[in-house]
Every structure is written in structure tokens, then in C-alpha cells.
Amino acid sequence: MIGGVIWGVWRRAGGAVRAAAGSLTPRGWGLLAAVIVAVVIWVLILAWGQARYDAGRTAGAAEADARWRAAAQRLEQRLDRSAAVADRREADRIRDHQAAVAEEKEKIDEAVDAGRSPLDVLFGGL
């Protein structure tokens, strides 16, 4: 349908285009050619600029991706070191807590053996 409309407009305008083309002087043809060449050059410049922009953006993306990957790797190494330190400190806290519990249990056992209340040991001899 659209093709038919375009064809009809072209058929009707074709006579006007031929009449206008017949009335062009050599200078007019030169001017028309210059305009067409200028438009083609402009389109080529835009296409070239877009291609350079896309290439630069792609190269920049690859570089940024490489930097992000390196930063992530450094972060994982730091996390591993931090986890190791935290594990050591947790082991120390567990060992200290177990020692404190064992000492408290000994004091409670001594208090029970001596006939005193275990609550005196727990709450400081109230």
C-alpha cells in the first residue's frame, strides 16, 4: 500500500522533476553536484566519527573491566588475610573463654568441697 502511494507520488512528481532538471543550467548542475558531494562527505564524516567513538568506548570498557577485575582480586586477597586474622583471634577468644570457664569450674568445685555455696564463687562472695 505504501509502495503504491510512493509510486503514485513519484509518477506525478516525475514530470515536475524532469521539467526542473531540463531548466537547470550548467552552473545549477554544478551547484547540485556540490551539495550532493557535501552531504555525502558530511555523512562519511559522521560515520567515521561514530566508528572512532565506538572503538574508543570499547577499548575504554576493556581497560576499565581489567582495572575492576584487578581491584576485585586485590580485595579478595585482603579479605582472605582479614579472615585469617579473624579466625586466629576467634581461636584465641575461645581458648581464653574455655580457660576462664575451667578456672570458674575449679573454684565452684573447691567451694562445694569446702561446704560453701557455689553462688558465692559466681557472684563474688555476696
Image (cartoon, rainbow, N blue to C red):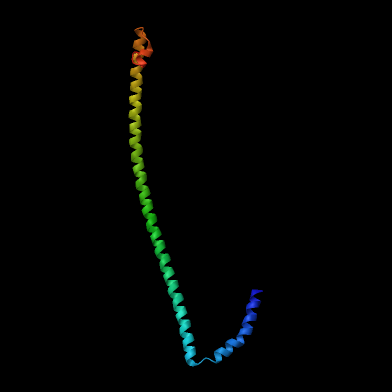
Q: Which residue is at 38% across, 48% downward?
A: 72
Give the vertical position of 61 relative to 1 (above or below): above
In the rendered image of this protein, does residue 31 appear above or below residue 43? below
At which x and y percent is residue 117? Answer: 38, 10
Residue 66 located left or right of residue 37 = left
Query: Up-down: is 64 above or below 81?
Result: below
- Dividing the picture into quadrants, the one containing residue 120 is top left
The structure residue drawn at horizontal position 40% and vertical position 59%, both measured from the top left corner, is: 61
Q: Position of residue 7 (x, y in %)?
A: 64, 80
Residue 15 lies left or right of residue 30; in this view the side is right
Identify the image quadrant of residue 64.
Answer: bottom left
- Give the percent coordinates (x, y) of residue 97: 35, 24
Above or below: residue 102 compared with residue 40: above
Task: Check the image and name the residue furthest to the top.
Answer: 115
Residue 108 horizontal side relative to residue 38, left or right: left
Image point (37%, 44%), residue name? 76
Count of labels shown? Answer: 0
Residue 43, position in %: x, y?
46, 75
Q: Residue at x 35, y 31 (%)?
A: 90
Check the picture and name the quadrant holding the N terminus.
bottom right
Q: Quick one: which residue is furthest to the front in this view? A: 126
Q: Quadrant of the C terminus?
A: top left
